[in-house]
């Protein structure tokens, strides 16, 4: 949020694992802009409230559901590295989401890290060695 006496700017990150719910959230923001413009005299040429939606990434699930063999290969590779695969939803943008929509289905293989997005974010050498083993197993599968 930033602003002064003449204007204000709010930046929101809109997220939802469900595409329909995501669309509803975006529509709601557009509707709010219409309401505020009606109330405060904004016009199409000079809106009091302007909404700009910029998509940064999408949920990779729809892409991966079309390629179950990739998820199965990842599960086998994780299992062969001595770990038990766990499927779970994660929040946040990943390179895998972007790559998936660019034509390379790319599931998250796990993070192995700790203290995310803070000054003590880190990953152990052992965690890095494990992910290298998982990647090698994917190539072998």
Image (spheres, rainbow, N blue to C red):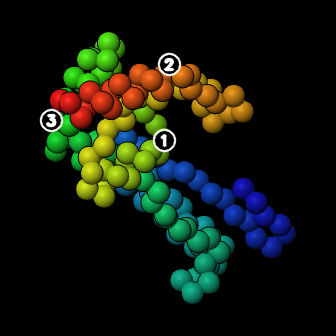
Q: Residue at x 80, y 73 (%)?
A: 6
Measuring from the top left, give residue 44's x and y in whole percent.
53, 83
- Secondary structure of the residue carrying tag 2 is helix
Dots 3, 1 in contact, CB < 8 A: no
Which tag, 3 or 1, sits closer to the chain's start? 3
Q: Residues within 10 Å of mark 3 (few under 14, many from 20)?
A: few
Please say whether residue 47 is visible from this viewpoint: yes
- Image quadrant for the N terminus? bottom right
Q: Residue at x 43, y 48 (%)?
A: 95
Residue 69, numbered circle: 3
Residue 92, numbered circle: 1
Q: How many marks?
A: 3
Dot 2 corresponds to which residue?
126
In this view, the residue in front, 67 or 129, is: 129
Which one is in front in this view, the residue at disc 3 or the one at disc 1?
Answer: 3
- Horizontal side, residue 106 vs residue 72: left or right: right
């Amino acid at each position: 949020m930033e602003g002064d006496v003449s204007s204000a700017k709010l930046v929101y990150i809109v997220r939802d694992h469900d595409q329909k719910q995501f669309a509803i959230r975006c529509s709601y923001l557009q509707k709010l802009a219409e309401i505020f413009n009606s109330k405060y005299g904004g016009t199409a040429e000079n809106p009091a409230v302007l909404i700009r939606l910029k998509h940064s990434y999408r949920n990779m699930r729809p892409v991966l559901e079309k390629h179950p063999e990739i998820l199965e290969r990842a599960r086998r590779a994780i299992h062969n590295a001595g770990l038990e695969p766990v499927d779970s939803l994660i929040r946040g943008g990943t390179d895998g989401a972007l790559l998936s929509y660019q034509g390379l289905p790319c599931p998250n293989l796990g993070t192995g890290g700790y203290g995310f997005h803070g000054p003590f974010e880190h990953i152990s050498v052992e965690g890095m060695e494990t992910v290298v083993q998982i990647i090698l197993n994917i190539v072998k599968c």
